[in-house]
Amino acid sequence: MRILIVEDDVEAAEAMDRGLTEGGHECRRAADGEEGLAVARQAEFDVMIVDRMMPRMDGVTLVETLRRDGDQTPVLFLSALGEINDRVTGLKAGGDDYLVKPYAFAELIARVEALSRRRETGSVQTLLKVGDLEMDLIGRSVHRQGKEIDLQPREFQLLEFMMRHAGQSVTRTMLLEKVWEYHFDPQTNVIDVHISRLRSKIDKGFDRAMLQTVRGAGYRLET
Amino acid sequence: MRLPRLFRTTPFRLTLLFLALFGAAASAFLAYIYVATAGEAQRRTDKEITREAASLAGAYNRGGLDGLNQSLIERAANERPFLYLLMTPQGQRISGSIAESPLDKFDGSPTWASFSVSDLDAENRPVKHPARGFQERLASGEILFVGADIGEDQAYVGKIVRALWGAGALVVVLGLAGGVLVSRNVSRSMASLTDVVASVRNGDFGARARVRGSRDEFDELAEGINDMLDRLERSMAGHRHAGDAIAHDLRSPVTRLRARLEAAYIDLEAGRGNAEQALAQALEDTDGVLKTFGAVLAIARLQAAGEAPSPQLLNPGELAANMAELYEPVCEDVELEFRAELAQDLVVRGNHEFLAQALANILDNAVKYTPTGGAIMLRVRQRSSGEVEFSVTDTGPGVPEADRSRVVDRFVRLENSRNQPGAGLGLSLVAAVAEAHHGRLELAEGPGMVGDIGPGLRVALVLPRA
């Protein structure tokens, strides 16, 4: 993946660059909004990671300008501001996701990968297929190896999200945000409980466990 | 040279401006009065003189020159205010009450003249009176002069003029005095506000403007300023408490983290220990610190704002149902019975995210502190007062009554309540959320002793009717 990092904190940018490069991605860096705009206009990227507060041109202005130009590259906002209103401002400006500093690197990677995937699957799908697992979005049914799996509505949503991001790490926070639409951290690991229920339904009785726990990050649906 | 403070005030300048405008209007008005009175006096005199002349002309027509002379002598002897003079065609005096005509030149056509006559006052001193007269040539060639002493009229007009001057002076003096009074009053009101601003600028956030109770715009402004300062002070106190709390709450976990890292480092240098495990532990500790930091920050921001951000009308039953859906499996997982009774036709006004988080925190606590085999009940209902109540009842050990108020208390006392079982940072956030929604958090005894454990806890988040 080609990733543009627009971040004025050199150390943070370097750490991101190193981590993403080790993960097999190709990174370019820009130290402020204006430089970021110039680089983004020169080359094509799969994902942009944009800090919100930067000298010369802030992240929101940068993304607004790009969107006006017709650039639809997915953008992940990074910000020290985590209030709901800040989040809304960022997303309204054309950001696709929002990560509050300080963050875990696993969270960043998971979100960046989720963003790139979303771009590829632009067309409307009615059938999701991951390995021998099939989900019919119209009939609201799930089958594995031809056997019907009965899911509660929320379990269905949870599995749909996992299937749309098959092969990628998905964090608990992402699940809470995208499936339940909550933006806070419950003290107990509620997400783990829901995942383990889902796991028992789709993996129990089959030779291979598809829903894997990724240590330190979250979960992954193996293809 | 600088003007005295009073003269530089806006109200005083306005007073001067209004005084100038009023003065101009008063001058025009007074001028009209002068013209109306003094002019009227002269017109009346002229009319009377004309009438007298006409009356004499009648006498002349009836009795000729002799008749006129006769009539003139009679009239001059009477106590009439008129002055008469009958002259030959050459201007020689024939008879009358004055010695000579005041007119130097006379071309024969009827002519008016203003002049003065000498008289003696009460103490026999000669005085001059203004007079006015009319001179005409009779048909037979003789000249007749009829005049009148208008001293009294003039004196009357003079009185009016003096009265007008007096009135003008009074207008100016009263206007200025009023202006000074009003300006002083306004300046004093402004000065107290300016003093407050100066005090606050110098760091005294406790300074407040005096509200005089006159319910005028100054009181309104003072109340507005005081309200603003209250909010500012509260907000600053909130931030200060947040700073204190963050320092306090984070010091121990950060110290622990540091100690662990140090120990791990020493171990690794000595060739013992497990680097991977130490790092994993450090990561976990860091996450804990960040979580605390986030919660403390959220509480402080809510308290500082004093109001939940972007409130909207929402269905509390629906909100609780979503939370129940999230927590029911968790309860089942740790073998707790979970039940929900949710009224579905209610409306509250609030921030969805914060209310959900508050409910999650209450449920988290219930799950954490209720022993296996216990039960948790989530309820949403309307009280008879109209308030909407979210409540979570558990069969855990509960919170001793003495500590309950401390748990609900403001963030300041967080340190005390944090050490109590069952009341962590979570409930402080719930209290802050309740307050930001103009509601409250109530803690009460639960269902009583269940087995050996009790009395349980009932936590209620009560919101005002929408």
Image (spheres, coloured by chain):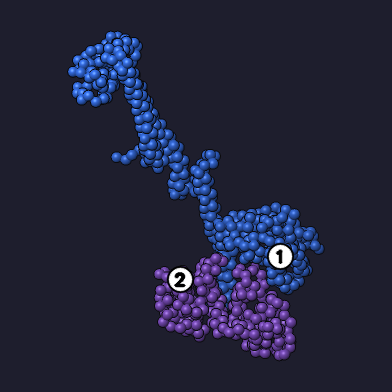
Quadrant of res A110: bottom right
Instruction: Pick whichever, B209 or B161, lies toward us.
Output: B161
Looking at the picture, does residue B35 appear above or below residue A96? above
Q: Residue at x 46, y 40 (%)?
A: B189
Q: Residue at x 50, y 46 (%)?
A: B221
**Three-letter amino acid code of the residue under disc 1:** Gly
Q: Tag 1's secondary structure?
A: helix
Q: CA distance from mark 1 to mark 2?
A: 40 Å
| Residue at the extreme left | B90
Task: Assign the N terminus of chain B to one quadrant of the image.
Answer: top left
Instruction: Pick whichever, B211 or A52, lies toward us.
Output: B211
Task: Assign the C terminus of chain B to one quadrant of the image.
Answer: bottom right
Q: What colour is chain A?
A: purple
Chain letter of mark 2 equals A
Image coords of residue B6 (percent x, y): 38, 38
Image coords of residue B395 (percent x, y): 76, 63
Give the side of residue B391 with respect to residue A221, left or right.
Answer: right
Image coords of residue B87 (percent x, y): 22, 16
Q: Residue at x 76, y 59 (%)?
A: B446
Can you identify the residue that label 2 sits on?
A61
Q: Residues within 10 Å of mark 2 (few under 14, many from 20)?
A: some
Image coords of residue B400 (percent x, y): 72, 55
Instruction: Pick whichever, A101 or A92, lies toward us.
Output: A92
**Three-letter amino acid code of the residue under disc 2:** Thr
Chain letter of mark 1 equals B
The verdict on a common chain for dots 1 and 2 is no
Q: Is residue B296 visible?
A: no
The chain letter of the blue chain reads B
Can you identify the residue that label 1 sits on?
B317
Q: Tag 2's secondary structure?
A: helix
